[in-house]
Image (cartoon, helix red, strand yellow):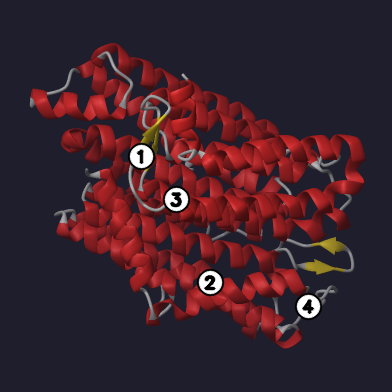
Amino acid sequence: MQTLLFGDIATLASEMVIALAAMALLMIGVFRGDRSTRLVAWLSVLTLAAALALLLDGGDSTTIALRGMFVADPFALFAKVVVLLGSAFAIVLSMAYIEREGMARFEYPVLILFATLGMMMMVSANNLMALYLGVELQSLALYVVAALRRDSLRSTEAGLKYFVLGALSSGMLLYGCSLIYGFTGTTSFESLSALFLDRGAQPSLGLLIGLVFLISGLAFKVSAVPFHMWAPDVYEGAPTPVTAFFAVAPKVAAMALFLRAVIAPFIELVGQWQQIIVFIAIASMLLGAFAAIHQTNIKRLMAYSSIGHMGYALVGLAAGTPEGVRGVLVYLAIYAAMNVGAFALILTMRQKGGMVEGISDLAGLSRTHPFRAGFFAIFMFSLAGIPPLAGFFAKFYVFIAAVNAGLYALAVIGVLASVVGAYYYLRIVKIMYFDAPTEPFVRPIGGEMTVIVGLTGAFTLLYVFYPAPLIAAAQTAAQALFR
């Protein structure tokens, strides 16, 4: 046991740092109270930075730990980097908001750390049981964070809805895992892959039913249709910094888990699960495109936008090839950057009466706040997939992967859905630049927000000039799943 423990410490160094720091920060908060919120928040950001440094220092070799339950490979490295950056940005975005709105509680950054720990365990899961434990560690923290604003009926309702529907999805996920174990006798991804590779026969009906339940549970975590019903209400009801966090790190981690849980053990069954992914992708793209057209709340619109974007990402998974996985990973990195920047600007939507969330409140923003309007337009154009911004290339990679895999109809539907979805993004740009100004926003954007908006905006705008590093990293990560 000692040999096992010491051999695993280096592999799990990042996760251990986050776990130990989260418990230590929890104690600091308990003894110092809510006045320690900003200190705990910055220490949490420092913890995530330390975890990122340890992760990058560990290299991109493949290592198995915890008796085969945990795998550290280039795929996990790529996803964890995006998750850690997304979580750190989410904490920084929230600091001024939670203090201004009377929500400064030290539990918030600590809960984000625990959720991030769950996400990192998810993307490194090499076993169905490890998968489930990672998902639940993330989910339990997110349920509480969604209802953080206890004096708000909307926030409490969002947390309750997320909890109830999340418990249902966890049950489906666990039931699928139990069926897979019952019909194969193993929960290890490596054993499952070897089992189907050696047999070369058709899987049993019970196994396929288990796979359907597994995919359904994972589809809920990425808010893919028809398991999307929680996203609009939770996005609208949760405090805006929480919504920003939900839209970035958990989505990236859940989609990375989706890739690993479907590709690594079941790549030999691609003919059986591909049609399910195709259906979910088409339904998500179409609903995300059409349902957002009549939205008036910016957070609710971003929820439907997220549903649509997860549909586009699933196009790459449906291809079932290294090229498709590479496209999904690039998509997730670009999607995270666009959403962090967009939500940073949404958090500055404050008038004399308090926070505003209506799309109409952006009217004339180009005349009252040209800096915000310019960057917001960049993010909206990129989310719409308009070249030469980064969002265009994100969609291009997954559509090309689908075409090369022979999924022509899926690619065509994706392009058409993207055209329809462009309407509501461009409508926001039209409102900012052509409508008469309304009451201007009362607060300056702030130094922290300026840095985050500048970094994400520059990445979105300038990606076209130097895409090679991200593509190369995603290619190496994708190949790791097909070992």
| Left or right, 333 with reference to 468 | right
Q: CA distance from mark 3 to mark 4?
A: 52 Å
Q: Which amino acid, by three-letter code, is at mark 1?
A: Thr
Q: Which amino acid, by three-letter code, is at mark 4?
A: Thr
Q: CA distance from mark 2 to mark 4?
A: 20 Å
| Residue 424, percent from left and from top | 52, 67
Is residue 21 depicted above or below 170 in this figure?
below
* Residue visible at 18% across and 33% down in the picture: 269
Q: Which amino acid, by three-letter code, is at mark 3?
A: Gly
Upstream in sequence: badge 2 or badge 4: 2
Q: CA distance from mark 3 to mark 1?
A: 10 Å
Which mark, residue 185? none
Residue picked out by circle 2? 380
Residue picked out by circle 4? 438
* Residue visible at 69% across and 85% down in the picture: 370
Tell me the crowding category of disc 3: few under 14, some 14 to 19, or many 20 or more residues within 10 angstroms, Cα based: some
Is residue 18 depicted above or below 296 in this figure?
above
Q: Nearer the viewer, mark 1 or mark 4?
A: 1
